[in-house]
Image: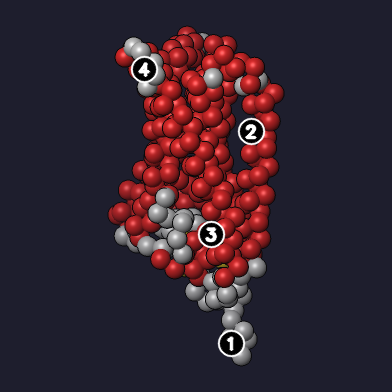
Amino acid sequence: MERENQTSISEFLLLGLSNQPEQQQIIFWLFLFVYLVTVIGNLLIMLAISLDVRLHSPMYFFLANLSFTDICFSSVTIPKMLVNHIIGSNSISYVECMMQMYFFMTFGNMDGILLMVMAYDRYMAICRPLHYTTVMRPGLCILLVAISWVIINLHALLHTLLMAQLSFCADNAIPHFFCDPYPVRKLSCSDTYISDLMVFTEGGVVFVTPLTCIAISYVFIFSNVMKIPSTQGIQKALSTCGSHLTVVFLFYGAIMGVYLRPSSSYSAADTVATVIFTVITPMLNPFIYSLRNQDMKVALRRLILTKAIL
């Protein structure tokens, strides 16, 4: 009888970040500004790296991939919210919601994988400089990124298929501006044990592994840097890691307490943390890498001046 009383839903309602019209208008313009800055900033990073031969190295190859991923990551959630605001609707179809979750998990986890690969690149450059050019070959860099995309897509597909197996009843209101897997799972009226178990096992491995590898890489980096006799040498070595570490802290700091606990405990504070790593971090990445990296500053300045002359 309980199963007979359940109704099949064809769409979800995205409640957004506020139900006040004035605040919704402010949020719309703020998100539009952030999205434009994110796309333009990351595109400039990609163009600068592709056009400047001095930046054709593994570190900048991975940075270009990170910029591409950040553009896609922001494009998964923000445009839908902006369009809904313009047309005066807060609905998203069931199929769109599943697709949004799939790409959200794909690009979000790919960010973490790329940060891990970039940490390994810095480890090789600082701790194994004599072997750097022989190990970090272009073929290996491409292979690392390709394998990462395959693993992350399989991960996202698994969790999306598990989500599609859940039943949803009359309550279809998501307290967010996109289909975040946790609040969506919370709406399910069926048993989410298998889905939750996979989040804490396979999902936990995909999340924790990059973070652990980043931490191990920097343990070796810092221990090696401390052996450098001159203070100037230490500063030079750490300057190449400063931008990467800043991005790592921003990215993992925001999601550490959100996606490693049961969906039943999802709260408004988690929504704010999610906004930080889905909206704010992709926007800040270009500024962090350009402002803290002299080579990027020169390349971006040359790119902008060239475009201005043309």
Q: Nearer the viewer, residue 136 or 129?
A: 129
Distance of mark 2 from mark 4, alpha carbons?
30 Å
Q: Where does label 1 land, which residue?
A: 2
- Let me know if residue 112 appears in the view: no
Q: Position of residue 158 (x, y in %)?
A: 65, 56
Where residue 234 is drawn, which disc sits there? 4
Could you tell me which secondary element the residue under label 3 belongs to?
helix
- Disc 3 residue type (three-letter): Phe
- Identify the mark nearer the N-term, 4 or 1: 1
Q: Identify which residue is drawn at 36% across, 17% down.
A: 234
Q: Identify which residue is drawn at 49% across, 61% down.
A: 182
Could you tell me which secondary element the residue under label 4 belongs to?
helix
Q: Nearer the viewer, residue 93 or 270?
A: 270
Q: Position of residue 191 (x, y in %)?
A: 57, 75
Distance of mark 1 from mark 2, alpha carbons?
47 Å
Q: Position of residue 296 (x, y in %)?
A: 45, 18
- Disc 4 residue type (three-letter): Ile
Distance of mark 2 from mark 3, alpha carbons?
25 Å
Where residue 145 is drawn, which disc sits there? 2
In this rendering, the label closer to the viewer, 4 or 3: 4
Q: Where does label 3 land, which residue?
A: 200
Distance of mark 1 from mark 3, alpha carbons?
29 Å
In this rendering, the label closer to the viewer, 1 or 2: 2
- Disc 1 residue type (three-letter): Glu
Distance of mark 4 from mark 1, alpha carbons?
66 Å
